[in-house]
């Protein structure tokens, strides 16, 4: 298992969604679990989020979205990552959470999100998922 303090996680809130309590709870829980966490704040554009991933050399991108624009914004973020030479779940583990209907969550997972965590997902499940999947990234491969 990778030492958590070496794992850098971006928690991002794309679009016009101004509700960030859940994102802050997740960011704090991940930090308390030993990860390095950078919270980008609310109302970030997909371009700003991808730039943060690059500038911070992030290992994980956690996208928190409640606005209903997840089927527009998340695919755009995935596309921009690819355009910048970062393969989702090969170079950066991409997870999402928030109010995302199950059918949409399945579609997002088909196009490149590693896992979508819905409302009420236990924080322990998110931490375990990161622990179990971070070693799949090239930079953490043995």
Image (cartoon, grey):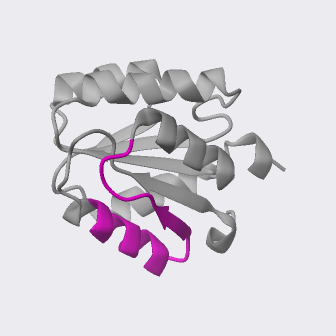
Q: Which residues are magenta?
A: 23-44
Q: Is residue 133 visible?
A: no
> Percent x, y for residue 44?
38, 45
> Percent x, y for residue 90?
66, 34
Q: Observer-nearest residue: 54 or 99? A: 54
Residue at position x 68%, y 38% from top?
91
Quick check: is 30 in the magenta stretch? yes
In the displayed structure, would residue 6 be above or below residue 106?
Answer: below
Q: Considering the image in quadrants, where does the N terminus appear?
A: bottom right
Q: Observer-nearest residue: 54 or 86? A: 54
Residue at position x 28%, y 70% from top?
25
Quick check: is 24 in the magenta stretch? yes
> Percent x, y for residue 8?
61, 61
> Is 4 placed left or right of 123 in the picture?
right
In the displayed structure, would residue 58 be above or below residue 136?
Answer: below
> Is 37 placed left or right of 56 in the picture?
left
In the displayed structure, would residue 89 be above or below residue 135?
Answer: above
Residue 14, quarter of the rendered image:
top left
> Is 86 placed left or right of 119 in the picture?
right
């Amino acid at each position: 298992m990778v030492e958590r303090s070496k794992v850098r996680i971006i928690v991002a809130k794309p679009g016009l969604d101004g509700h960030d309590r859940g994102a802050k709870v997740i960011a704090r829980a991940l930090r308390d679990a030993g990860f390095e966490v950078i919270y980008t704040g609310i109302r970030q554009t997909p371009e700003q989020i991808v730039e943060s991933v690059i500038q911070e050399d992030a290992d994980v991108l956690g996208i928190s979205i409640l606005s209903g624009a997840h089927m527009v914004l998340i695919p755009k973020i995935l596309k921009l990552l690819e355009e910048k030479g970062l393969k989702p779940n090969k170079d950066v583990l991409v997870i999402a959470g928030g109010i995302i209907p199950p059918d949409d969550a399945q579609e997002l997972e088909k196009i490149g999100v590693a896992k979508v965590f819905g409302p009420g997902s236990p924080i322990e499940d998110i931490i375990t998922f990161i622990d179990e999947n971070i070693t799949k990234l090239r930079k953490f491969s043995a």
